[in-house]
Image (cartoon, helix red, strand yellow):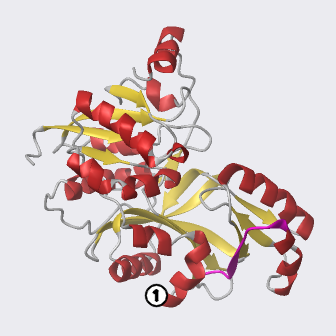
Amino acid sequence: MNPKKKLVLAATGLNNTDNPGPGIPVIRAIRESSDLDVRIIGLAYETLEPGIYMRDLMDKVYLIPYPSEGSEAVMDRITYIQEKEHIDLLIPNLDAELYTFIKTEKELRELGIMTFLPTLQQLEERHKNNLPEFGKKYNLLVPKSKAIFYKTDIPGLEDDFEFPVMVKGKFYDAYIAYNKEQIDIYFNKISAKWGLPVIIQEFIRGTEVNVIALGDGRGNTIGAVPMRKQYITDKGKAWGGITLDNPAMLELTHKIISQTKWRGGMELELIKTDEDHYYYILEINPRIPAWVYLAVSAGQNLPEALVKLALGMEVKPFTSYEIGKIFVRYSWDMIIDIKEFEKISTQGEI
């Protein structure tokens, strides 16, 4: 595809709140590309997702059904949107929707919509409840963990774990539990929101660090930037962070992408232990994280590179980034007219 041709790109993850989705910074990064001329189609799940009303970033926005409503409902809506917009590329940005879009990748391609996503095998093997097997397969350090489906499993956890432990949802949410009673509370909370299983994970003491990366699907790392969170919300989300000079984190990232032949964006959530400075993998998030704009500002426009990979364009790996670059998030009151809200609510598009 001619890089100067008008590209129609659709993206999800417009929920830019205290639990921000990656959609807004991904779109922002692509808008800044000097090689790509884009028309942006936002895909939203709720009428109050802030990205819907960011008119400087979105050319058009459509509501789409939640993946929980089934792939048929999602594809019916995407087909309708495609008839009007002629989308070239779709970038899903939320964990919970990836299974649906990977499963329907062939159908999307038949509609003329490209994606650049991990394979179903890649998605499944790095899943939280499969992380111990993932660690063994690729010789990586991971915390001991166990997936539980019933509250009756909780009393027996003391045989396998020492308190505190992490209690995690299969897609999102993580809490520290200091006793069985707290596990019981978090089990109810997480399972009601994200379903089962709930994952119990060994608590590793150390410093949490993260890496954003992009793999080309052939074992090559196109880009990678390590970061340490400097300010964390009560939901555990980074509200400030700084790029790090850390060859060990980059080496680990290259190893994982080389061994798995990862395709698409990823985020590694790591713990660097206090005593021996080992790196344990807490999670591998199978998409671009919400702090991606820090990497862009540090010199690696990974969303732009992902678009180029999806279009079959040649992309040279990034070889450097700025160390000591800091991001700080802030809140901003965006004022909209009720007519805009009524339009997206009643017509499903704006």
Left or right: 119 in relation to 318? right
Q: Which residue is mark 1?
A: 138
Left or right: 116 in relation to 134? left
Q: Is residue 123 above or below residue 137?
A: above
| Residue 314 drawn at (x, y percent) | 13, 62
Q: Is residue 28 visible?
A: no
Identified at 36% across, 65% down, the residue is 118
Q: In terms of image quadrants, where is residue 322?
A: bottom left
Q: Is residue 32 visible?
A: yes
Identified at 57% across, 77% down, the residue is 131
Q: Is residue 88 above or below residue 259?
A: above
Quadrant of the drawing holding the C terminus: top left
Q: Give, as a single range, the part of the protein colored magenta.
A: 142-151
Q: In terms of image quadrants, where is residue 164?
A: bottom right
Residue type, label 1? Tyr
Crowding near pointer 1: few (<14 within 10 Å), some, many (20+)? few
Q: Nearer the viewer, residue 43 or 225?
A: 43
Q: Nearer the viewer, residue 27 or 200?
A: 200
| Residue 35 drawn at (x, y percent) | 16, 45
